[in-house]
Amino acid sequence: DGGITQSPKYLFRKEGQNVTLSCEQNLNHDAMYWYRQDPGQGLRLIYYSQIVNDFQKGDIAEGYSVSREKKESFPLTVTSAQKNPTAFYLCASRPGQGLTSNQPQHFGDGTRLSIL
Amino acid sequence: DAKTTQPPSMDCAEGRAANLPCNHSTISGNEYVYWYRQIHSQGPQYIIHGLKNNETNEMASLIITEDRKSSTLILPHATLRDTAVYYCIVRATLGGTSYGKLTFGQGTILTVHP
């Protein structure tokens, strides 16, 4: 089945530790996104990528880093600089290059990150 | 992107149609209306989207008023598994500073009961 796979489902981070969240899609989508969702709140954009080897900061990129070496993969690293990393992290992808596409984004099932 | 207004909660009996309203009175001509839903601890699920014509797919129907200031998502035969938070989102196709991101509001908590 085609879809977006996020792993792990649950992740725990120790103080001063970097952790990487995986996002893989087999939908052949060009654009990929990382969002953060806090309890009772909407989604906030962390990073996005429209094409391989290119990515842009979203609204809350500080303390996070990404890479896009392959079309199907868009991993997110939560660095020790992110002081409040506890949240639900969602990866999404969308077909078609360019911001003018009206095609909808499709989401993975998320990774819940907690601080130990 | 235009702001949307949705009722905080709605109830629906199983097997009946669920009609979820959304107000987007400041929508502009190039903005699409998208509907997603989110079940607790899962990622948002895309349902349907449209520009100005009514749309239907296997999950739902989307009715957009002629002036495009409001829309209604219709789940024709609601089941218990349709209990979720439903989000109405308006997004422009042009880039600008939107990056193509989706802005989720508070949504409507739909509870389907037996």
Image (spheres, helix red, strand yellow):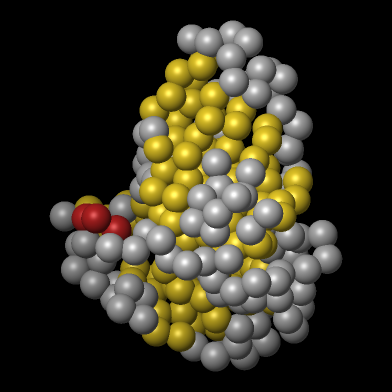
Q: How many marks?
A: 0
Residue at image x 59%, y 20%?
A18
Image x and y of residue A56, in percent? 75, 50
Residue at image x 54%, y 24%?
A19
Would you place residue B105 above or below residue A87 in this image?
below
Image x and y of residue B75, in percent? 33, 71
Image x and y of residue B109, in percent? 42, 50
Residue B26 in sight in this render? no
Would you place residue A109 above or below residue A16 in this image?
below
Image x and y of residue B70, in percent? 60, 75
**Closest to the observer: B95 or B91?**
B95
Residue at image x 39%, y 28%?
A10
Farthest right residue?
B96
Residue A33 in sight in this render? yes
Residue at image x 76%, y 60%?
B98
Quadrant hosting residue B17: bottom left
In the picture, the quarter occupied by the C terminus of chain B is bottom left
